[in-house]
Amino acid sequence: MTRPLRLIAVVLALSAVASVLVGAAGVSSMTADRPVQISVVDDDSAVIGVDDELHLNEESEFITNRFTEDVTLSINTTGPDQGALSLHTEDGDATDRSAEPLELTLSPGEAVHAHLQANGNETEVEAVEFDIEAEGERVDVELTRTVDVVAEDADNEASNTTTGSASG
């Protein structure tokens, strides 16, 4: 190697070693204060809306998809016997509760309707627990809700205790 090339190689090698030892001119960490605001809404306004009551012997709109895309719901229940609680979509697509979890797909704005049938031969049901998973293209939600069972009393006024019972 010629002398000028050797000198250039030595200078470059020393520069590389110096930059490793000293560090590059750049930002290694940064702190910034930014205001953050978080809002929590009730279940009836949430993107997967869940009603907080089931009315005994009445059909009600129970779970609503407020996302802007289709979601597939997977629903497990704890409470009444399988035959006492029926769930279906607005189109009448019934669900088979003999094999939980129940799986059904809801379009934006579509709801699951619930009907809890009373039968005087079984124990009273005061609440039903729902484990709900919703999945879509950009959606992944898991929630557990305990829903009160409301029955009409003799004066046709709602009470939080069932006057009947649920069975299958």
Image (cartoon, rainbow, N blue to C red):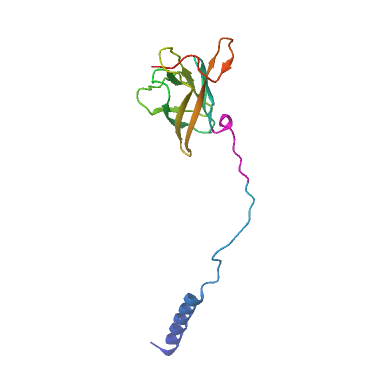
Question: Which residue is found at the position 55% from the left and 71% from the top?
Answer: 25
Was residue 42 drawn as part of the magenta stretch in this picture?
yes
Residue closer to the observer: 89 or 49? 49
Residue 137 pos. (x, y %): 46, 38
Residue furthest out toward the left: 99
Residue furthest out toward the top: 154
Residue closer to the observer: 112 or 98? 98
Question: Which residue is found at the position 43% from the left and 83% from the top?
Answer: 9
Was residue 142 drawn as part of the magenta stretch in this picture?
no
Give the image quarter of residue 81: top left
Query: Residue 89, relative to residue 43: is it above or below?
Result: above
Report the predominant secondary structure element of the magenta stretch.
loop
Give the image quarter of residue 86: top left
Residue furthest out toward the bottom: 3
Residue 91 pos. (x, y %): 47, 19
Residue 149 pos. (x, y %): 51, 21
Residue closer to the observer: 70 or 147? 147
Count of marks placed on residues = 0
Part of the protein shown in magenta: 37-47
Image quarter of the N terminus: bottom left
Residue furthest out toward the right: 35
Image quarter of the C terminus: top left
Query: Residue 126, relative to residue 139: is it above or below?
Result: above
Question: Which residue is found at the position 57% from the left and 29% from the top?
Answer: 44
Query: Residue 24, relative to residue 138: is it above or below?
Result: below
